[in-house]
Image (cartoon, rainbow, N blue to C red):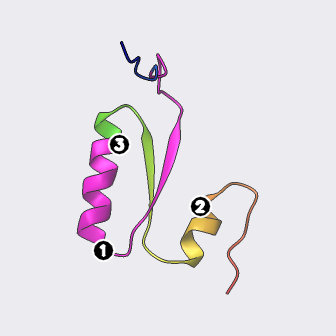
């Protein structure tokens, strides 16, 4: 019998960075993650993901 990986019992406080240049798709992915108990941060362009991470700055 194959076992499935155990899901964390509590996803509260876990953050997922969604990087997608299509706003509608980014919103759908963020919604799915939020419904799953995660906090989703959406970035629509290259410099934004770096700026979204604490302690980092965006560079061009």
Q: Residue at x 46, y 16 (%)?
A: 9
Q: Tell me the CA gap for discs 2 and 3.
A: 17 Å
**Residue 60 falls in image quadrant:** bottom right
> Which residue is at 30% across, 74% downward?
22
Q: Residue at x 69, y 54 (%)?
A: 54
Callout 1: 10 Å neighbours few (<14), some, many (20+)? few
Spatial separation of the CA atoms under disc 1 and disc 2 = 18 Å
Residue extending furthest toward the front: 1
Is 57 on the left-hand or right-hand side of 5? right
- Element class at badge 2: helix
> Counting residues from the N terminus, which is met first, the one under dot 2 or under dot 3?
3
Q: Which residues are magenta?
A: 7-33
Query: Residue 33 — which label?
Result: 3
Q: Is residue 10 magenta?
A: yes
The disc placed on residue 13 is none
Find disc 2 in the rendering and name its residue: 52
Count the marks: how many?
3
Q: Position of residue 12 (x, y in %)?
A: 48, 27
* Residue 8 in magenta stretch: yes
Quarter holding the N terminus is: top left
The nearer-to-camera label among 1 and 2 is 1
Residue 39: give x, y in percent of width and height.
44, 41
């Amino acid at each position: 019998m194959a076992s499935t990986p155990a899901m964390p019992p509590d996803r509260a406080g876990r953050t997922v960075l969604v990087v997608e240049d299509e706003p509608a798709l980014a919103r759908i992915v963020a919604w799915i993650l939020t419904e799953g108990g995660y906090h989703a941060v959406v970035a629509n362009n290259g410099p934004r993901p770096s700026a979204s991470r604490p302690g980092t700055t965006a560079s061009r």
